[in-house]
Each structure stands twice: as C-alpha cells, then as structure tokens.
Image (tube, rainbow, N blue to C red):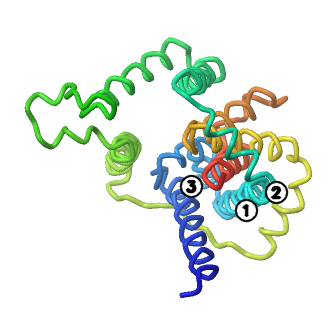
Amino acid sequence: MDPTSAIVMLSCIYWGALFGGAITSILFNIPGEAWSVATTFDGYPMAQQGRAAEALTAAFTSSFIGSLVAVLLITFLAPMISSFALKFGPPEFFAVYLLTFCSFVGLGREAKHKTVISMSLGLLLAGVGMDTVSGQLRMTFGSAELLRGINFLVAVIGLFGISEILLTMEERLALRGHAAGISLRVVLSVWKDLPKYWVTLLRSSVIGCWLGITPGGAIAASFMGYNLAKRFSKDQESFGKGRIEGVFAPETAAHASGTS
C-alpha cells in the first residue's frame, strides 16, 4: 500500500476509535473509552431528555474541530513542538501531572475531599504491578496476573458500566439504551448554535493540544476541558443536567490531545 494511503487509513481508524467511545457514553452511560467518561456527565442526561441525536451531533462535530486544530498545529509547527517535547524530563512530567491533579480538585463538581479520596484510590490502584523504571514489584501479592497492573480502561468501564447495568436491571429489569435518529435538521440545528460556544471550543482545543504535546494525555484533557467549561460558564448549575456545552468541551479537548 502507498505510504500516504496507509497513513490516511490508520488515522481514520484511530479517529474512529477516539470517537466511538462517545456513542455508548451518550446512549448507555457506559464510556467506551477512558477519555469518554466526561462525555457521560451531560451526554447521557441529554439522551434521557430525548436529545440523543443532538448530543451525538455535538460529539462528532466537536471531535472534528479538535482534531482539525491539532492537525493544523502539527502540520505547521511540528519541528518546534518536537524540540519542545524532547526537553521534558522528570521535573516537567511531575509538574504537568501535579497541574492535572490540582485542576481535578479545584475545578471538580463534587466536594473537594471526595475528589482527593477518589484520586488517592486511583493512585493506589495505579501503583499495582511492576515499576517501569526499577522493575520492582509493587502490591502484586505473588500474583502473576497483577504484574501488568490494573488496566485503567477496565477499571473505568467496570465502575461506570457495571453500576449502570445493575441500576438499570433493578429499575426496569432490562438494559435499554436511548434511541437516536440523527437527521439533517438536527445536525443543522446544532451547527447553527456552534458560534455561541466558540470560546469553549477554542479553549478546549488549546487544552487538548497542550496536554497532547506534554504527557498529560486525552483523559486529563477531557476532564480539564469539561471542568473549565463549567467554571467559566454563567450557568454552572445546568452542567450535569443535559447541557450541550458539556459535550462540546470534553470531546474537543480529547480529540485535540489524541491527535497532537
């Protein structure tokens, strides 16, 4: 296969995988990928209100915008970005992760002590397995299965997916998602409102590109994009209740980060 065609094909597969997690996040409240967790906060409430088509349209539109910004950035500034990224050492890695954790605490929608407890539990689970630097075994308790550690995606899907399945079975004795019939009218309606959220889209794109170049990653970018959108919104109380801006922000940031 021609190298250019191969790169295009692999890029399409990658972007499709990035976006795919948003579908189950919106329709079933089960994140298909770790960076789709933030999309569930407003995407699923929109689906419950019968606005699943709007949420999905917002998701793929913001995904395109975030990816486009990152592609343009990489295309024109690749040499500068690569030289900057190569300068990162242990102090810079620590600073980026510390900034990410602080943003979770400062911008989180829950009580700060709950956020700290959740992060502590996450760090405890992340400590299981073989240390990548020293090779030292940590909290494996003699189990060969724990040598690789606890997979983040498995933990996230377990926390969100299993709980949602059990809750749905308890309430309705059946796992049912929400229908989403996307029409041209819905797509044009969402696109018509895009200029209202240009600040959110731009801010999330910048956050995503920054955390993509640095070792933050798409997961941190999606949460930070969502939290900043909520923090700077004039109607913070509407977040978590089906606000379309709560879908634009994490999807834009995640795709900008994943692309850059």
For image coordinates 48% across by 55% down, the residue present is 28
The x, y position of residue 215, in whole percent, is 56, 37
Residue contact at pointers 2 and 3, CB within 8 angstroms: no
Q: Of residues 250 and 192, which is closer to you in this image?
A: 250
* Mark 3, secondary structure of its residue: helix
Label 2 belongs to which residue?
76
Label 1 belongs to which residue?
64
* Mark 2, secondary structure of its residue: helix
Q: Of residues 124 and 94, which is closer to you in this image?
A: 94
The x, y position of residue 71, in whole percent, is 74, 59
Q: In this view, does 72 lie to the left or right of 46?
A: right
For image coordinates 42% across by 16% down, the residue present is 117
The x, y position of residue 175, in whole percent, is 37, 58
* Mark 1, secondary structure of its residue: helix
Quarter of image, res 87: top right
Q: Which three-letter amino acid code belongs to the residue tagged 2?
A: Phe
Label 3 belongs to which residue?
26
Quarter of image, res 98: top right
In this view, 71 is above or below 128: below
How crowded pointer 2 is (Cα within 10 Å; few <14, some 14-19, many 20+) is rated as: few
Whole-number angstrom distance, CA of label 2 to CA of label 3: 34 Å
Q: Of residues 207 and 73, which is closer to you in this image?
A: 73
Label 1 vs label 2, nearer the camera: 2
Question: What mark, if any, has residue 157 been given in the picture?
Answer: none
